[in-house]
Image (cartoon, grey):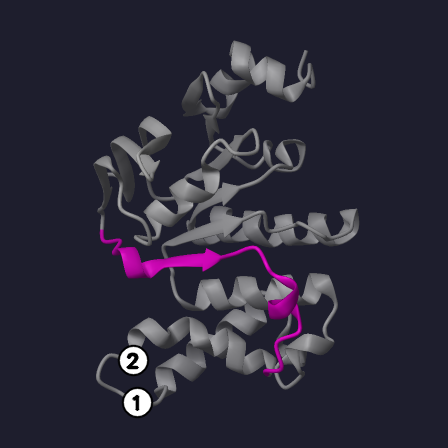
Amino acid sequence: MSQLSCQNVSFAYEGNVVLEGINFEVSEGDYLCIIGENGAGKSTLMQGILNLKKPSSGKILTGDGVKPEEIGYLPQQTLVQKDFPASVKEIVQSGCLHNLGLHFFYQKQDRIRRDLCLKKLNIASLKNKCYRNLSGGQQQRVLLARALCSTSKMLLLDEPVTGLDPVMSRELYAQIRQMNKEEKITIIMVSHDIRGVIEDATHILHLGSKQIFFGEKEAYKNSSIGKRFLGGLYE
């Protein structure tokens, strides 16, 4: 049974169709990379997966024990967010907000979860630091820890290495790879850095104005759309 499936999904803004006929599914432990040209609808699809935008037609369904609120999300940062004056522990623990229910305050298990995620991302020493004073790479690790704090099943990542240098990018990719391989956390990543992520991906969803591809990575490499987009990288 799939954890997430899109069944003939379309999206429209003010009557103008921006995505049409999207079909794919993701199972436990998959690593799906969503790629495509600018304006192809990647951000719109992410909003749909997060239940922030309703499809104009079709269905987006979760299953296999995954609920929409259990999808951890790492968004792209704005300049304002990078200057957010909160402590690292406060930001990471906010990933547990959906668990509060009728409680007004975080519970002991939330603090335990927070500290575990800090440790997994190797940023426990930054726990009491102010987020705004961290480097770009450290900030991304904090946000990834926050996303992980909200889920043990699926992470949705939007351009996670934007603005990072090659060394920090490789380190963050390694952290994501470890979560996927060792903890079986399903990864859905939107990225322009196809060369940086394609080796880790198990599946590719390519959104284009004239052609859409969904399938396993090797099939994508050998497809006409994949060969054009990869620019002969695997020839």
**Relative to 208, does residue 186 appear above or below in the rendering?**
below
Q: Which residues are magenta?
A: 65-86
Q: Identify the residue at image location x=66%, y=37%.
A: 196
Quickly name the residue at label 1. 104
Quadrant of the snapshot with the N terminus: top left
Mark 2 lies on a secondary structure that is loop
Count of all numbered marks drawn on residues in the image: 2
Q: Amino acid at mark 2?
A: Leu
Q: Is residue 162 magenta?
A: no
Query: 172 and 77: which one is in front?
Result: 77
Q: Is residue 84 magenta?
A: yes
Residue 70 is situated, as x and y percent measured from the top left of the image, at 32, 60
**Relative to 16, does residue 85 appear above or below in the rendering?**
below
**Relative to 192, does residue 150 appear above or below in the rendering?**
below
Determine which quarter of the picture holds residue 222: top right
Assess disc 2: are there few (<14), some (14-19) or many (≥20) residues with their C-alpha within 10 Å of its C-alpha. few
Query: 39 and 82: which one is in front?
Result: 39
Residue 123 is situated, as x and y percent measured from the top left of the image, at 64, 72
Q: Is residue 234 left or right of residue 72?
A: right
Residue 150 is situated, as x and y percent measured from the top left of the image, at 39, 66
Determine which quarter of the picture holds residue 132: bottom right
Quickly name the residue at label 2. 100
Determine which quarter of the picture holds residue 131: bottom right
Q: Identify the residue at image location x=31%, y=49%.
A: 53
Q: Amino acid at mark 1?
A: Phe
Mark 1 lies on a secondary structure that is loop
Q: Is residue 166 left or right of residue 84?
A: right
* Label 1–label 2 contact, CB within 8 A: yes
Assess disc 1: are there few (<14), some (14-19) or many (≥20) residues with their C-alpha within 10 Å of its C-alpha. few
